Image (cartoon, rainbow, N blue to C red):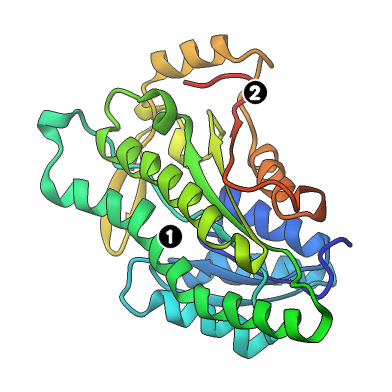
Amino acid sequence: MKLLDRTAIVTGAGRGIGREIALGLAREGARVVVNDLDAGPADETVAAIHAAGGSAVTSVGSITDADAPDRIVDTAVSHFGGLDIIVNNAGYTWDSVIQKTGDEQWEEMLALHLTAPFRLLRAAQPVFAAAAKTEQAETGSARCRKVVNVSSVSALSGNPGQVAYSSAKAGISGLTKTLAREWGRYNVTVNAVAFGLIATRLTAPADDDVEIDIAGSAIRVGVNRTVLDRARESIPLGRVGTPVDAAGAVLLFCLPESDYVTGETLVCGGGWRG
């Protein structure tokens, strides 16, 4: 229980990797604000945390909404009295080669994967700064707080068909490194985890015709089966990662053992970098 008396925000925590991150933080004692686009999955994650003896609340809605950053941060502060950990996990893929990528698609990927994390962290800054100032005055040191931004190997190596997604995720690197420098004075570490091939609904074979509902719009997701097969063959560990594997990499940056690590990007891909 290394995160007792800590409060965490996890975006996109109703399903898949985000759900496993929320559950993992709760197992370590953290109180969790579960954000998701859909109320049903968010409620299910909270119920699972409660069933295991943990504490969690929901903050439902798209992280791209104008009021989402303040609303999510306010939920943490009003319910749990503070904020210690932010995991910017929410997202989905909307793939096309560049000549077929429209402005709406480009803007949506940037808004979701780069602008939304920026705005959530901007909303959290006053809370982190005030807490650090108070703790410094009272005890002489501020507790270490954590930010983990989710990136992708697509940002590191590029990926055909993901010009918008990979560009947004590449921007996460600059956000992470800059905030690591800006927030060191608050004793906040800021790191990123770049996922490789993780088995979720977003990486199902494309010919399975998997669609997700985003605010009433059906977005087809998935990866070409031939590309998937080649990727699997290239993974040194010999298997596709699971959401539990992915969550474990994020949790590494949330635990006290990583208190002197900041501004880094960890690749969680079984040795595969795209």
* Mark 2 / mark 1, whichever is N-terminal: 1
Q: Specify few, some or many for label 1: CA neighbours under 10 Å numbering under 14, 14-19, or 20 or more.
A: many
* Farthest bottom residue in view: 78
In the rendered image, residue 38, in percent from the top left (x then y), is placed at 45, 67
Name the residue at 71% across, 50% down: 251
Query: Residue 270 shows which numbered tag?
Result: 2
85, above or below 262, in the image: below
In the rendered image, residue 222, in percent from the top left (x then y), is placed at 39, 33
Nearest to the observer: residue 144 or residue 247: 144
Name the residue at 52% across, 68% down: 35
Identify the element where label 1 is drawn: helix
Nearest to the observer: residue 216 or residue 271: 271
Identify the element where label 2 is drawn: loop
Residue at the disc numbered 1:
117
Name the residue at 46% across, 82% down: 71
Amino acid type, mark 2: Gly
38, above or below 161, in the image: below
Name the residue at 78% across, 73% down: 141
Residue 240: name its quadrant. top right
Query: Residue 133 shows which numbered tag?
Result: none
